[in-house]
Image (cartoon, grey):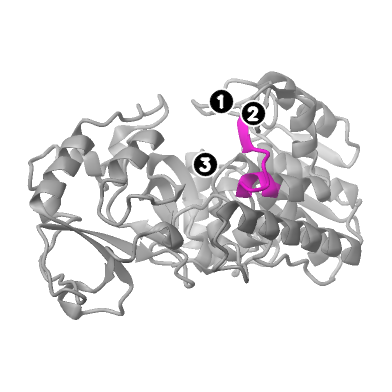
């Protein structure tokens, strides 16, 4: 019986999936609704269309996304290979001529004899067929509705209203303190107290900061249930003090102080290497977030590994629904790749597509799944989204904060990242050789 996999969507993740599957002799039915139908964000008929920036971020291995690209190169990612062929000058970043990039990838996929392209909108998933869903952050409403029913509506999200995430090692723990409101809880919150002068200065800068305009395909009604922090601040000088910065019931156990306002940070992972700034979903530009949120006591030197966002997105509650191989827990023949899975960003989507493909091959051939540890960029992504908090899950970019390392006390951060990168590259090469990856 011929082995065949349905790949739904020909974006970055879907194209990578299809190519990788084909390399191992797997027949692919690649479903793509373009050119018959497009979302408001899509303009081109080609595959792997970059609808936002043309940048795939840094090439430096001291940047986790740069390391991830290096790992993908080792693993023969077709999307990264073509991106380098279509590169345009961008300093230390990898930016591409977006038309040449998508055109070249479309040609490669169309010429592949193992890949059958079906120009059709998929509205429903058959959980009994080998399937990789890679429909992206703008998954059509019909497929969304049916996936919601299949996976459970409460585990499916249609917009991304996320607060900034910072690394714990960049926080000033002489100013921050651990405490729960009225001492009720499990000491999961880190608190940053503000006096009246600090609070008033912060609010003034917040309400006057520059914001990002919503794109034409993003309906403001989507965000009605989750107000941006800067919008709340504009409702009155004390609005935040009665909202996310409420000081009542919080006392600094080190000094017995109470505060005029308190910003709370919540652990983003079990290890406590990352913290989420609670209630700070925002439309501020990234540079403005860095400037304004660094005014908060204890966050003066905070390293932001993800900025707050409020944009149209579609993603699942990954830790509830999938394992670290991007495989649905409930339906073993179905994998989810790309931003729908809970990874955030172009390169992260490519990485998830590659991982889905190589383990779909293993599933079909009844062989051991390939696992990369969290010491690698590619492994840390899957491990993080599969083990993050189900209650407060937010999509995640690749970053050194979710990678494990025995070098926690290394003082030189760049040197530490260089050593982590060297170890990651060594592991990826070792696994490639061990499992005979093409």
- Mark 2 and mark 1: span between their CA atoms? 7 Å
Quarter occupied by residue 411: bottom right
In the image, which disc is placed on residue 49?
2
Q: Which residue is mark 3?
A: 137
Tag 2 near tag 1, CB within 8 Å = yes
Mark 1, secondary structure of its residue: loop
Residue 128 can be seen, yes or no? yes
User: Where's residue 366, x and y in %?
Assistant: 84, 71
In the visual, does 307 lie left or right of 361? left
- Of residues 252 and 102, which is closer to you in this image? 252
> Is residue 256 positioned above or below 264 on the image?
below
Q: Which residues are magenta?
A: 55-68
In the visual, does 92 lie left or right of 170? right
Residue 28 can be seen, yes or no? no
Q: Which numbered disc flags the more N-terminal residue, 3 or 1?
A: 1
Mark 1 neighbour density, 10 Å: few (under 14) some (14–19) many (20 or more): some
- Of residues 251 and 334, which is closer to you in this image? 251
In the visual, does 362 lie left or right of 400? right
Q: Which residue is mark 1?
A: 42
User: Where's residue 174, x and y in %?
Assistant: 30, 66
- Of residues 106 and 293, which is closer to you in this image? 293
In the image, which disc is placed on residue 321?
none
- Mark 3 and mark 1: span between their CA atoms? 12 Å
Q: Which numbered disc flags the more N-terminal residue, 2 or 1?
A: 1
Mark 3, secondary structure of its residue: loop
């Amino acid at each position: 019986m011929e082995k065949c996999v349905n790949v739904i969507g020909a974006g970055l993740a879907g194209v990578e999936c299809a190519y990788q599957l084909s390399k191992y002799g797997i027949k692919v039915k690649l479903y793509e609704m373009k050119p018959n139908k497009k979302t408001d964000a899509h303009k081109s008929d080609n595959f792997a269309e970059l609808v936002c920036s043309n940048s795939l971020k840094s090439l430096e291995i001291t940047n986790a996304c740069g390391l991830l690209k290096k790992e993908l190169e080792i693993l023969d990612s077709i999307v990264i290979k073509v991106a380098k062929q279509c590169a345009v000058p961008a300093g230390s970043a990898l930016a591409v001529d977006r038309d040449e990039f998508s055109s070249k990838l479309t040609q490669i996929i169309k010429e592949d004899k193992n890949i059958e392209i079906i120009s059709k909108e998929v509205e429903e998933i058959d959980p009994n067929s080998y399937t990789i869903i890679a429909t992206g952050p703008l998954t059509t409403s019909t497929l969304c509705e049916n996936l919601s029913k299949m996976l459970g509506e409460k585990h499916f999200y249609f917009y991304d209203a996320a607060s900034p995430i910072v690394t714990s090692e960049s926080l000033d723990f002489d100013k921050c303190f651990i405490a729960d409101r009225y001492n009720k809880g499990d000491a999961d919150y880190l608190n940053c107290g503000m006096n009246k002068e600090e609070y008033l200065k912060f609010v003034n800068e917040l309400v006057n900061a520059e914001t990002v305009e919503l794109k034409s395909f993003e309906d403001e009604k989507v965000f009605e249930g989750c107000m941006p922090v800067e919008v709340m601040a504009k409702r009155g000088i004390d609005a935040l003090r009665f909202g996310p910065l409420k000081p009542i019931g919080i006392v600094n156990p080190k000094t017995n102080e109470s505060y005029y306002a308190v910003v709370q940070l919540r652990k983003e992972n079990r290890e406590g290497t990352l913290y989420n700034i609670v209630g700070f979903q925002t439309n501020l530009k990234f540079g403005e977030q860095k400037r304004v949120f660094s005014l908060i006591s204890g966050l003066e030197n905070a390293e932001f590994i993800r900025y707050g966002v409020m944009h149209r997105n579609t993603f699942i509650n990954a830790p509830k629904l999938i394992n670290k191989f991007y495989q649905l827990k409930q339906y073993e023949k179905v994998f989810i790749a790309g931003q729908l899975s809970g990874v955030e960003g172009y390169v992260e989507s490519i990485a998830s597509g590659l991982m889905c493909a190589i383990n779909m091959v293993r599933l079909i051939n009844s062989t051991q799944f390939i696992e990369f540890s969290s010491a690698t960029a590619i492994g840390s992504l899957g491990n993080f989204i599969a083990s993050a908090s189900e209650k407060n899950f937010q999509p995640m970019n690749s970053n050194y904060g979710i990678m494990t390392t025995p070098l926690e006390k290394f003082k030189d951060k760049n040197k530490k990242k260089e050593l982590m990168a060297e170890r990651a590259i060594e592991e990826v090469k070792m696994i490639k050789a061990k499992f005979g990856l093409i």
